[in-house]
Every structure is written in C-alpha cells, then in structure tokens.
Amino acid sequence: MNRTRNGFSWKQIGIATLFVLACEAVGIVGALTTDTGESSWYAGLEKPAFNPPGWVFGPVWTTLYALMGIAAFLVWRAGTDRPEVRRALGLFAAQLVLNAVWTPIFFGAESIVGGAVVIVVLLVVLALTVRAFFRVSTVAGWLLVPYLLWIAFATLLNLSIWALN
C-alpha cells in the first residue's frame, strides 16, 4: 500500500477527509438555519456579559468540526470489529445528531428552553463520547476536549440566556 511519510495511506487520508467533511456539513447546515442579524429574534434577547461577539462562532465551530472529524477517523481506524470502537462511534453519532438538532430548536423554533434541554443532553453524551474515545485512542480523546469545553461554555450561555429572558 502506498504510504505517505506520516504512515497513512492515501486511502486513509481520503477517508479522514470524508469524516471531517461530514462533521463540517453539520456545521454548514446549522449556519444556514441561524439568523443572528440585527433584526433577528436572537438579537432581541438579553445576553450575559460573557456572550462572545458573533464573529467568534464561525472560526471556533469550523475548527471544532475539523477536530471532531479527525478524532472520529482515528477511532474508526482502530477497527470497527472492536466493541469499544463501535460504542465510541455510536456515541459520536448520537452527539453529532444532538449537535445538529440544537440549532433548529434554539434558533429555528426560537425555543430557549428546548435548546437548553438539548444542549444539556448533548453535554452528557459528549462527555461519554470523550471518555469512550480516550479508551480507543488517547489522541482522539484529546482532540475532542476543546469541543467538550466549548459545549460546556455553550451550555452555560444557553442556560444564562434562559435565566435572563
């Protein structure tokens, strides 16, 4: 098999790219359904002082989705014949679905409470995912830690918006 200098085959690099693109697609769909402009429902909400400026979200999410895709690839690469790999990838899929549904619930349905419920469940499932990833690949686990921290922050933000509104 034709390998690159880093030990990956070109086929594996292609598969890793597909994992990253799949994760980024979740973010793109979310971004297309999010209206945070000056005349939006979101703009009229009271927000806590620690609410980041809008321009922060795009670069942060783009980076996090890329890290998620790489992490999932590393776990997948460990072999889907292993039960711990299948469990880790199952948890990953579950958290990705929760991630995808938060945006249309919070922004689309304009439901702060619905968003809060989803993001709290997402935080729990993501923590389980990170633990499962660490059991398969230390590198994959660490690649998800920034995402876990961001979701913890986003949970605090969502709950704070709920309290203020």
Image (spheres, rainbow, N blue to C red):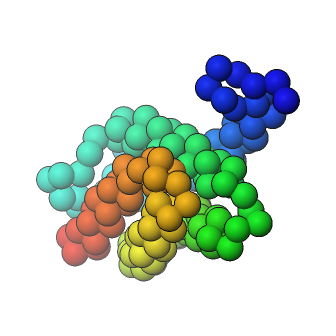
Q: Which of 98 and 143 is in front in this view?
A: 143
For image coordinates 59% across by 67% down, the residue present is 88
The quarter of the picture where the N terminus appears is top right
Q: Position of residue 39 (x, y in %)?
A: 40, 48
The quadrant in which residue 86 appears is: bottom right
Residue 20 visible in the snapshot: yes
The quarter of the picture where the C terminus appears is bottom left
Q: Nearer the viewer, residue 124 or 56?
A: 124
- Residue closest to the far left: 49
For image coordinates 69% across by 50% down, the residue present is 77
Relative placement, left or right, of 61 versus 38 is: right
Relative placement, left or right, of 56 versus 27 is: left
For image coordinates 38% across by 59% down, the residue present is 148
Q: In this view, does 63 lie above or below 43?
A: above
Q: Where is residue 147 in the image (x, y as percent from the top left)?
A: 41, 53
For image coordinates 70% across by 22% down, the residue present is 4
Q: Position of residue 137 (x, y in %)?
A: 52, 54
Residue 28 visible in the snapshot: no
- Residue closest to the far right: 1
Relative placement, left or right, of 79 versus 140 is: right
Number of marks: 0
Q: Which of 2 and 16 is in front in this view?
A: 2
Q: In this view, does 123 lie above or below 143?
A: below
Q: Is residue 135 above or below residue 14?
A: below
